[in-house]
Amino acid sequence: MSGRDLLAYAGRALAGHRLRSALSLLGVAVGIAAVVLLTALGEGARRYVVDQFAQIGSSFVAVVPGKTDTVGGIPGIGGVPNDLTLADARALERAIPEALYVAPFVVATDTVARGEKRRRVMVAGVTPEFQDLRRLRVASGRFLPAGDLERGASVAVLGAGLARELFGSDDPVGDVVRIGGRRCRVVGVLAARGQQMGLDIDDIALVPVATGMRMFNRSTLFRIVIDVGPGADLDQVVERARAVLIERHGEEDVTLITEAAVVASLSGILGALTLAVGAIAAISLAVAGIGILNVLLVAVAERTAEIGLLRAVGASRRQILGCFLAEAVMLSGTGGALGLAGGAVAVRVLVGLWPALPAAPPPWAIAASVALSLVVGAVFGWLPARRAAALDPVEALAGH
Amino acid sequence: MIELDGLSRTYQIGDEPVHALVDVTERIGRGEHVAIMGPSGSGKSTLLHLVGCLDRPTSGSYRFEGREVATLDEPELDRLRRERFGFIFQAFHLIARLDGTGNVELPMVFAGVPRSERRERAQAALAAVGLAARAGHRPSELSGGERQRLAIARAIAMRPAVLLADEPTGNLDTRSGNVVLDLLDRLNDEGLTVLVVTHDPRVAHRADRTLILGDGEIVRRARREELATALVEWGLGAEAHR
């Protein structure tokens, strides 16, 4: 018996019970669509995070005050860490001469006012390198000027949204705003860019880092970012930076984070989550499989005489087994194909509603869906097919 | 061709063994036309199933075309049924979802006969039973007599050596029954060995000879000219003529 004949025979048998067949394959379709949709969501979340990090590159080492990655440690407990200072930043600059830049910065929420208009926004004290670090474009004026790190001029660069709200259609460059009670001259306005790593670049004010520290009355930096450029040995840079800071502080009271490590671990976590969600969705396939099992048990019972006839005309037990397995796999396979199509449509609708999320089912999920739908048919079709094959031909012909 | 020696078949129904066939010894030659009669439960169908390798004997020997059937494994029995035997049933056992051609092709599909040859042989078999014009009809669109002729076309499609018919006219009126019997006679004339299980003396009368079974044993062998007497002797004529 050729494969084509087997499929034709099984297909005809299924077509004889359209509604019953359609309902049982619908079960598989829903299960597969759920797998596709949920893994697409998980993968979308993973890609979203990875993309966000990719925007700022991955050749960075961030130095954060406080030890956060000791076992079970909570920062601040077991001794107040030393301040992370601009002097530390300069020491790092000397210790890591190959670094493209060492960018210290400090961040706080503060009020930016122009006359009666006031806005509470994120204010960041940064160095000129911050422009490269965040790949910022200046729409008018210029970025913060280079100069003495510790002096701190009273100048500011405004985000596009903030500039519009405070100045309307006027050009802010050259005008003055008050940030936290301090007069600052606006030297530039950033190009509109939107959300980036949870930081609204459009709604931000940037001032020189020393200005920021005085403004916020801080003695410690928020962090120091070291960019060593692509291809550098990050681990080695981390060790040198750690050594410098231990020497200066007398203890290890900073945390060094490489963005690559953060991205990798986040990506790993979200990938595992996607797998878990997909697996949960796959459980619904077991329910669908029981539907197929039921439909086939009914089919075997109804077609007992037919099975007897097939044995009488010379069909072997294996062929009978094959016929019913083929029916089961056709049901689940067709259901799987419909589920893939349905899932793809659902993902497209989702992306249409929520374009920021790059939702797409990962290739492994699609491959697993196809494999799983066929396996469901084979596994749940096995029992009825075995039952059909085991029938005694004489009894089957008599219809019992 | 068919050599039965001390053939017995015992079923177990609950605790009780049922002796469906007891010590049957018989020879049936190539091209013979033999009827099997007997009251219900006398073992007629069991004998037919054993000969057709649908069932295995409990004891005794059955040689078909010189080979001891008991020594054959299941795939070889499948092959015998596929290639050497054609079955015809009282209930036709046609597949409702397939049309005439589909039903006739069925044995060839499972035998792996190529598509084009299958179609050709199905047409020939349908023509042989006078159903060429009804090839595209489903069983539900055919009369009883046509259905049985379709079943015969299916039985002969694989060009078997032996035709085994279990009450082939049991569900038919006299007229369409006769058409079916004429067809069986013709196939027998063409060289097919025919075994017919029947209640009906008119069916048995067509056979060269008749085996009369009682309680699983052959109680009488009657040639055509002896049939009437034998049936009266065994009280079977009256039942059939009701």
Image (cartoon, coloured by chain):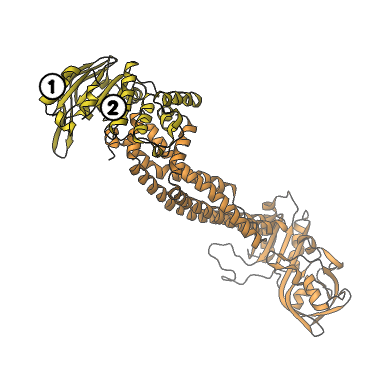
Chain colours: A orange, B yellow
Name the chain letter of the residue that bears numbered label 2: B
Nearer the observer, A66 or B239: B239
Residue B198 picture location, percent across and down: 23, 28
Does any portion of residue A142 appear in the rendered image? Answer: no
Name the image quarter holding residue B176: top left
Q: Name the residue under label 2.
A: B165
Determine the secondary structure under disc 2: strand
Name the image quarter holding residue A303: top left
Q: Residue furthest front?
A: B175
Q: Residue furthest left?
A: B233
Residue B139 picture location, percent across and down: 39, 37
Report the residue at 32% width, 38% height from top: A305
Q: Are circles 2 and 1 on residues that touch, CB within 8 Å?
A: no
Residue B155 picture location, percent across and down: 36, 26
- Residue A278 lies, with reference to residue B97, above or below; the image says below
Q: Name the residue under label 1.
A: B229
What's the mark number on residue A217? none
Name the chain letter of the residue that bears numbered label 1: B
Horizontal side of A139 relative to A120 (left or right) equals right
Determine the secondary structure under disc 1: helix
